[in-house]
Amino acid sequence: MKDHLHSVGQGYFGHLVSAWVLAAQLVFLLAVLPFVLVVHGLLPGVWDSVVSDKIEALNQRLQSGWHGEN
């Protein structure tokens, strides 16, 4: 456990908060993005890149090390 906390440069509670913030963001995205896709499916000109943009931003954040960045 301490190795991971050291490798990400966080203490226990900082890491806990970071993980919970990311979890809350993922829950929000998983609740909203399906609705966006349904609307986009019906109206192709609406929200044409929202889902792919959000997924790409999340991927970049995870690849660059999201710890401590809210």
Image: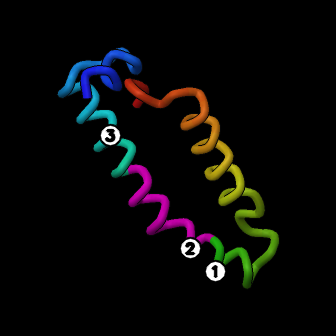
Name the image quarter holding residue 16.
top left
Residue that protrudes farthest toward the left in the picture: 13
In this picture, is 27 found above or below 63?
below
Left or right placement of residue 26 versus residue 11 in this view: right
Please state, as top left, top right, bottom left or bottom right, where the N terminus lies in the image. top left
Position of residue 52 measured from the top left corner of the image (x, y, whole percent): 71, 56
Which secondary structure is most common in the magenta stretch? helix
Name the image quarter holding residue 39.
bottom right
Q: Which mark is residue 34?
A: 2
Tell me which segment is drawn in magenta.
Answer: 25-36
Please state, as top left, top right, bottom left or bottom right, where the C terminus lies in the image. top left
Q: Rate crowding at label 3 as few (under 14), some (14 to 19) or many (20 or more) other CA atoms within 10 Å.
A: some
- What is the secondary structure assignment of the residue under circle 2? helix
Judging by the rendered image, the residue that carries numbered circle 3 is 19
Image point 41% across, 59% down: which residue? 28
State the CA–CA distance, disc 3 to disc 2: 23 Å
